[in-house]
Amino acid sequence: MKTRYTLVLLAFITCLAANAQEISDTSFGKGLINFTAKDSTFSVKFAPRIQARYTANWDHNGTDYDDADLNFLIRRARLKFSGFAYSPKLKYKIELGLSNRDISGANDYNRNTPRYILDAVIMWNFAENFELWAGQTKLPGNVERVVSSANLQLIDRSILNSRFNIDRDMGVQLRHKTSLGDGFIMKEKLAISQGEGRNVTEGNEGGLQYTARLDFLPFGEFASKGDYSQGDLKREATPKLMVGLTYDFNNDAVKTRSNLGSYMTLSDGSLYETNITTFFADAMFKYKGFAFMGEYANRDAENAVAINADGTTTGDIVSVGNAFNAQVSYFFKSNYEMTTRYSTINYDNITGRDKQAQYTLGVSKYVVGHKLKIQADISYGTVAGDTDNVMLRTGFDLHF
């Protein structure tokens, strides 16, 4: 079955290439195929990408470090399609994941099948500065999560993001951009989604999820949408700043991390439900090769501990608490970049989990911007200020 899908996809791409009436911007990094129909009623951009990495972990055992735990991994292998349909005002994006990490997570609520679809969304510019999005895509959460994994400065995102982000979901979004004068821009984003994450096919088990985000850009737009791309690879000629605030409410959530984590199952087979709120405050600043990104996250739940009808606990607890992440970098004219990051997680006592901290130092060599790069970083992490870990990672990104 998988072979059949692959052959169909390859045949489709071949037909596009053979029958293209207009092919433009075909240099590396601008898409493997750029196709526009002769009558300009649709377009397709096809851009596959690969992200590979090597990781070595050393855990402290009280007296010295254990032997390294080694891992080679194709972290991401994806097929991306984008363009417009019928009119340039109606755009679309499709992103499919092929790596194990991309398609894992099968459960009863997605019919125990791999989760190939990452994004499948249409974006309709129905009025001057208004866009209506419908389908499955990232919610307007913390800036680090919304930044594509292809545009990261370090090998992967922070521990804040791994525990508190709100990720992808299915639903609708309304987006608008407002000019406040003198170059000051505000972007408003509202979303209503299913509340259980991506590729859930068996209906909505809890309530709906509501997300609102405001972005403030007092000095105007970043070059090449740099407010959602890490590092100042464009070497902004004037200071650029984005400050964002996000509030997310997941009504009757059934997972331990809002629309992520594991389902909270009761002894009778039903799902435990509780209201979960998540708040983010973050910022992005860039100027002449210098870049800063900072984030704060806070998560709370109405009743964080899952309890059966007879009063016994199930063992499931919502990951409530707060986290902080900050990273600073400088992009040299030689296309090398140095980045340092500091991240902490402070769980509420009710979770029974200890405080975590991580310090990371990384270096990147950009061959063709984020499209082709080689990266390495080393991290030192602690749990409860005591048990510690050293992690070394190297990898590359290849993005057509």
Image (cartoon, grey):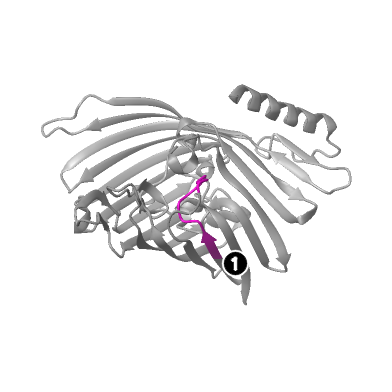
Q: Is residue 154 visible?
A: no
Along the line of sight, the residue nearer the viewer: 246 or 225? 246
Q: Residue at x 27, y 47 (%)?
A: 267
Q: Residue at x 50, y 66 (%)?
A: 213
Along the line of sight, the residue nearer the viewer: 63 or 286? 63
On the image, the x and y values in percent for residue 194 come to 50, 56
389 shown above or below 5: below
Choose top left, top right, bottom left or bottom right for residue 252: bottom left
On the image, the x and y values in percent for residue 249 come to 42, 64
Please name the amino acid that badge 1 sits on: Gly
Task: Report if residue 200 lies within the magenta region.
Answer: yes
- List the residue tagged with mark 1: 220
Along the line of sight, the residue nearer the viewer: 302 or 149? 302
- The range drawn in magenta is 190-202
Q: Secondary structure at mark 1?
A: loop
Q: Residue at x 74, y 42 (%)?
A: 44
